[in-house]
Amino acid sequence: MASIHRTTMMPTKLELLTGWLPKQSWYVGETETPELVKAGGFRLDDPEGAVGIEFMVVVDATAQEPVAYLVPMGYRGAALEGAPGEALIGASEHGVLGTRWIYDGVHDPVVMAQLGALLRGEAMPQHQSKSGTPDPTVTVHGTGPGGGLHDGVPSIRFSAGAVGRGRGVTARGRGSTPIATTAASTKTAAVMARPRA
């Protein structure tokens, strides 16, 4: 089970994402320096205890209508061997664990394996900021007709916090298809699980 440390990270995850996000082909913002706000997410445990796994929703508040992005991340104590250069979000100095290499989760085999385990009901989602605390707001919905957001595609629903300053926002991922939609009134995000393009 992962331990959440109350410490500093320099640079912070939001600072790293501010530089990385505009370089992604699926970024829809109009500025090269988004104003990102953490809006929710959840964690998964690595059975080996070596990789931190987080699915973070960040909202870009620079646009007229805020846009949310779901970013899966893997935190490692060493560089991920064989990962393409664009997979690295950045490195950060963690106050307890030392240097952490933070990767786009779609390029991290441990992150993808645990996402698959979650979709099969074999992994338990964890609270984003509390150690050893399951997150009951994260649920996986079926893969059959009518069971997911789109027939045949599993979906994950989770609390996204107060996003969009009272308005609904759409989270985007790889490609133009929204991967999560949040309604500020229900504070729930629904995420379609799709294979890496």
Image (cartoon, grey):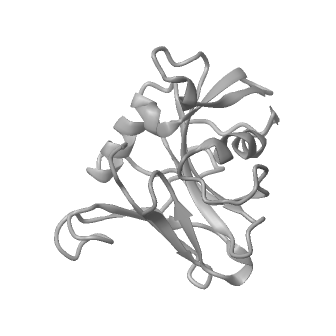
Whether residue 46 is visible here, answered yes or no, is: no
Can you give x and y, in whole percent of width and height, for residue 23 in the image? 64, 42
Instruction: Please say if 159 is above or below 92.
Output: below
Can you give x and y, in whole percent of width and height, for residue 26 in the image? 53, 52
The residue furthest left is 145
Can you give x and y, in whole percent of width and height, for residue 86 in the image? 56, 30
- Residue found 79% across the figure and 57% down from its top: 35
Nearest the eye: 73 or 83: 83
Count numbered badges in the picture: 0
The residue furthest front is 30
Nearest the eye: 30 or 99: 30
Can you give x and y, in whole percent of width and height, for residue 5 in the image? 72, 37
Instruction: Please say if 164 is above or below 62.
Output: below
- Residue found 58% across the figure and 17% down from its top: 79
Instruction: Please say if 97 is above or below 22.
Output: above
Quadrant holding the C terminus = top left
Whether residue 8 is visible here, answered yes or no, is: yes
- Residue found 58% across the figure and 44% down from its top: 24
Q: Which quarter of the figure has residue 98? A: top right
- Residue found 28% across the figure and 70% down from its top: 150
Nearest the eye: 58 or 120: 58
- Left/right placement of residue 90 relative to residue 52 reads right
- Left/right placement of residue 128 relative to residue 32 reads left
